[in-house]
Image (cartoon, grey):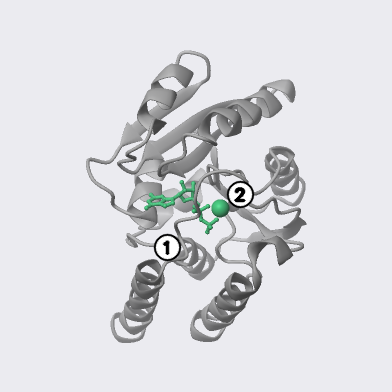
Amino acid sequence: MKISVVIPAYNEEENLGRTLTVISEELSGRGVEHELVVVDDASTDRTPEILQNLSSKLPLRFFRNERNMKLGYTLRRGLEHASGDVVFYTDCDLPCLPSAIVYALKIMQTYDCDLVIAYRLDRTAEGFLRRIYSSLYNFLIRVLFGLRVKDVNFACKLIKREVLESIRLESDGSFIDAELLIKASRKGFSMLQFAADYFPRLRGKSTLAGLGIIIKLLKEMFSFRLRLWFKGD
Ligand SMILES: Nc1nc2c(ncn2[C@@H]2O[C@H](COP(=O)(O)OP(=O)(O)O)[C@@H](O)[C@H]2O)c(=O)[nH]1
Ligand SMILES: [Mg+2]
């Protein structure tokens, strides 16, 4: 069984090298066949150069958007290029330990489920405001879509390939995580959640909490809700 680790990257010169190396070392060390798929969202720092260099050392394939397209578009592109039987999605700043990938795989195999989703055990490091936004968002997703997932946007998710093949993702922005989980759950795919240690970003800037990003996410969320009500799917 092969796992594809899909990672969106935007100006991550300070994190990329270490993140990709530790993930690949962890998986090789456990004898897990893997590939790393990174989509560079038109970074303006050394991200492209670093990817080029790493690709001769690691089982890495990388792609670049011509202009900054945001998270959803970028992630969809990465998922389309993933060739593994299962796909793990995480971030460049590696918010969970690479061993969480192996743990998630173990859960998937042991309980034979289609998605394994982590939630942050302790989010204090994220800051008060982020935690409030996040709780509100998880609550909204639960109320509007009936999805009982504790931490929708935590980038630590393991997904079977057949799930990705049977749903069509459309979000360009940060609603993508919710869209994936809602569509998978409406199709009847099984999900299990586990608590994971969360490690906040130490280097580089967090860019996904701006007002523009939040407005786009809410727009995508409400238009998806309306579409489900009026068109069904
Ligand atoms: N595609 C894309 N990815 C981004 C963008 N901004 C951040 N990311 C990536 O999304 C992931 C999470 O970003 P981060 O800024 O840590 O968000 P946070 O953890 O929600 O604060 C990282 O892998 C980033 O490189 C963007 O504009 N486009
Ligand atoms: Mg982060």
Earlier sequence position, callout 2 versus callout 1: 1
Q: Is residue 176 positioned above or below 1 on the image?
A: below
State whether label 2 is within 8 Å of ligand 2: yes
Q: Disc 2 or disc 1, which is closer to the eye? A: 2
Q: Give percent across and percent down for residue 204.
A: 51, 45
State whether label 1 is within 8 Å of ligand 1: yes
Q: Is residue 167 positioned above or below 131 on the image?
A: above
Q: Give percent across and percent down for residue 113.
A: 66, 53
Left or right: where 188 falls relative to 148: left
- The residue sitting at 53% across, 42% down in the picture is 92
Q: Which mark is residue 174?
A: 1
Q: Give percent across and percent down for residue 150.
A: 66, 70
Q: Can residue 232 be seen in this view?
A: no
Q: Quadrant of the C terminus?
A: bottom left
Left or right: where 119 falls relative to 90: right
Observer-nearest residue: 69 or 195?
69
- The residue sitting at 45% across, 60% down in the picture is 208
Q: Name the residue under label 2.
A: 201
Kind of element beneath mark 1? loop
Q: Can residue 189 be seen in this view?
A: yes
Q: Is residue 121 positioned above or below 52 on the image?
A: below
User: Mark 1 belongs to which amino acid?
Assistant: Ser
C-alpha distance separating marks 2 and 1: 18 Å
- The residue sitting at 64% across, 61% down in the picture is 191
In the image, farthest residue toward the top? 56
